[in-house]
């Protein structure tokens, strides 16, 4: 990946775990032996440059693959919905209908309120996360090497599994978190939402005692509220990152050993890919159901 004469296990792993970052290097930064006269927007050539670019930088590869897979999902499902007809579906239409029924049944079993947005959201989350996870089954060198060949840059960073980037998983979870807050306030009112954070789990009929309980209740409930997006993001990221790391470590082994280990791991990893998408979807439905409960 980075030159056969100088490649080491450390550089190989570091290269595969580094995103293609686009950001701004500050004026005065030394790059390739030259001092930048002014702040410059550019692609990071090293991990140190990516760190220097700070928060306002973009992981172009993660964003590109997540958007690309989202477009593929939207296009395919739109075509199926547009061409749907009465009678028994066949081929890919049958496969899509099976997914739709599976998600719809999951929503009916878990979500006990009325909101037409929940089922489409659950379907989008499940399929989109599954597609991003599935990229982990592509051999670790194929797409990065192809990207290097296309660009002519043998040192190009290029990660293809968007869910191994915490920026993507937190982006998904924070969007869900925003909807949790929105529907909690919409369904229960601002007063009901605040009461939910301050009057549980400890309560008392004595108003003065209840006031004393408010700080402890708020601390416990607020931590539980914040834990929802954090656990959503880190669970998905951690499992997919670990799976990718194992594939990278296997790729460091001699060729004749790689296939004897990568194939069994890939078969097992299919379960992880599917399971993580399913868990993410189920938790989203559960959290949205909790947000709609008025009698909590």
Image (cartoon, grey):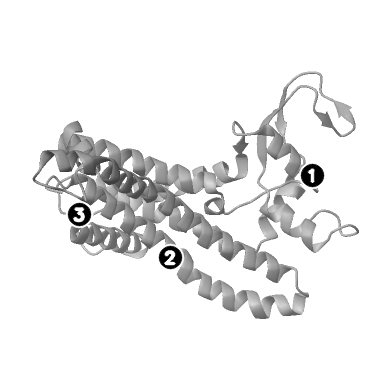
Q: Residue under circle 1?
A: 153
In this view, the residue in front, 180 or 140, is 180
Q: At 13% from the left edge and 44% from the top edge, which residue is drawn?
A: 294
Residue 105 x %, y %: 22, 61
For discs 1 and 3, the disc positioned in front in the rendered view: 3
Residue 25 x %, y %: 72, 28
Q: At 26% from the left edge and 48% from the top edge, which residue is drawn?
A: 288
Name the outermost residue toward the left.
Answer: 205
Vertical relation: 230 (above or below) 93? above
Is 113 left or right of 40, judged from the image as shown?
A: left
Q: Residue under circle 3?
A: 111
Q: At 19% from the left edge and 61% from the top edge, which residue is drawn?
A: 109
Tell me how far mark 2 sits from mark 3, CA to CA.
21 Å
Q: Residue under circle 2?
A: 274
Tell me how far mark 1 sits from mark 3, CA to CA.
50 Å
Label disc, if present, on residue 294 of the rendered structure: none
Which badge, 1 or 3, is on the more N-terminal residue?
A: 3
The quadrant in which the N terminus is found is: bottom right
For discs 2 and 1, the disc positioned in front in the rendered view: 2
Tell me how far mark 2 sits from mark 1, CA to CA.
34 Å
Label pair 2/1, CB-CB below 8 angstroms: no
């Amino acid at each position: 990946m980075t030159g056969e004469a100088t490649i080491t296990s450390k550089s190989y792993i570091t290269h595969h775990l580094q995103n293609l970052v686009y950001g701004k290097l500050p004026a005065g930064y030394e790059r390739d032996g030259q001092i930048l006269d002014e702040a410059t927007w550019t692609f990071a050539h090293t991990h140190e440059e990516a760190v220097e670019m700070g928060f306002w930088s973009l992981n172009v590869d993660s964003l590109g693959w997540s958007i690309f897979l989202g477009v593929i999902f939207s296009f395919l499902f739109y075509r199926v919905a547009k061409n749907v007809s009465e009678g028994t579906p066949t081929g890919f239409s049958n496969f899509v209908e099976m997914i739709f029924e599976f998600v719809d049944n999951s929503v009916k079993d878990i979500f006990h309120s009325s909101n037409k947005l929940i089922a489409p959201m659950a379907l989008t989350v499940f399929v989109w996360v599954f597609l991003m996870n599935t990229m982990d089954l592509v051999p670790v060198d194929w797409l990065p090497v192809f990207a290097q060949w296309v660009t002519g840059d043998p040192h190009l960073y290029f990660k293809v599994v968007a869910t191994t980037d915490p920026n993507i998983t937190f982006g998904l979870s924070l969007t869900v978190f925003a909807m949790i807050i929105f529907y909690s306030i919409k369904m229960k009112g601002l007063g009901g939402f605040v009461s939910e954070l301050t009057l549980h789990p400890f309560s008392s009929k004595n108003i003065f005692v209840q006031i004393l309980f408010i700080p402890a209740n708020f601390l416990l409930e607020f931590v539980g509220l914040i834990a929802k997006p954090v656990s959503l993001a880190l669970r998905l990221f951690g499992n997919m990152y670990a799976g990718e790391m194992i594939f990278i470590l296997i790729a460091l082994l001699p060729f004749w050993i790689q296939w004897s280990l990568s194939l069994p791991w890939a078969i097992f990893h299919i379960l992880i890919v599917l399971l993580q998408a399913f868990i993410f979807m189920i938790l989203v439905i559960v959290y949205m159901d909790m947000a709609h409960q008025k009698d909590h």
